[in-house]
Amino acid sequence: MNSRERILGRVRRALADVPADERSYEEAVPRHYLREHGERTTEETIDLLAENLTDYRAVVHRADAEELPLLIMRLLAERGSQEVMVPPGLPPSWMAAADPVRIHDRAALTPDRIDRVGSVVTGCAVAIAETGTIVLDGSPDQGRRRITLVPDHHICVVGVPDQVVASVPQALERLDPTRPLTWISGPSATSDIELERVEGVHGPRALEVILLG
């Protein structure tokens, strides 16, 4: 008997006395929590997202489609990035004005090679205003998880208002749980036992979010 069979056997024994007509977990557990905390206009929700992103030490910018390529070019130049990681499905117009060498994610790229790339530019799956969280799901405009965890500088473009929701429950309704979800609330950071904050331990030290209207 292998480990899988032992575990499934224990589950079957635990459920042996459960009546066949008992309500399912989804029905039996009440979910009376609020889907959204307060009523806001669309603009107020976007402003809340920007406020909470800033509170988490992300840098927030606003741009329209015409301004976006020049803004990305400026952010990469200010960072001094000689190379930028580009997901396979990133809209070409976003990088139309950028000068750095574009590194396209390939299976052959090693973590060491990705670590030498200064910045990464991606889209997102959804942004949550109440928590200041950006969620990536590995779609073509976001790429594989590793390309957003290794480079030290992440520029993430959020379409507003379409990609912005107020709350986590609303975000979960849009996300596919079978995809590789990455939830980002500000730059990567941790604290030691003396509560000394250290950034860049588990991901980028710098997160810049562009609200694309």
Image (cartoon, rainbow, N blue to C red):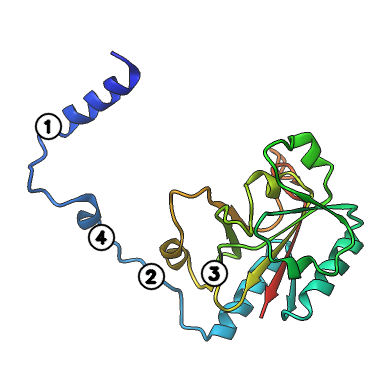
- Total numbered badges shown on the rendered structure: 4
Mark 1: secondary structure: loop
* Residue lying at 38% horizontally and 70% vertically, measured from the top left: 34
- Cα–Cα span, label 1 and label 4: 24 Å
- The type of residue carrying mark 1 is Ala
Give the class, few, some or many, for how many residues have Cα within 10 Å of label 2's Cα (few <14, many ≥20): few
- In the rendering, at what x and y percent does residue 189 appear? 70, 48
Q: Which residue is mark 2?
A: 34
Q: Earlier in the sequence, mark 3 or mark 2?
A: 2
- In the rendering, at what x and y percent does residue 120 appear? 76, 54
Q: Which residue is mark 3?
A: 130
Q: Quadrant of the C terminus?
A: bottom right
Residue furthest to the top in view is 1
Q: Earlier in the sequence, mark 1 or mark 4?
A: 1
Q: Is residue 177 above or below residue 38?
A: above
Q: Which residue is mark 1?
A: 16
- In the rendering, at what x and y percent does residue 194 appear? 72, 41
Residue 30 tag number: 4
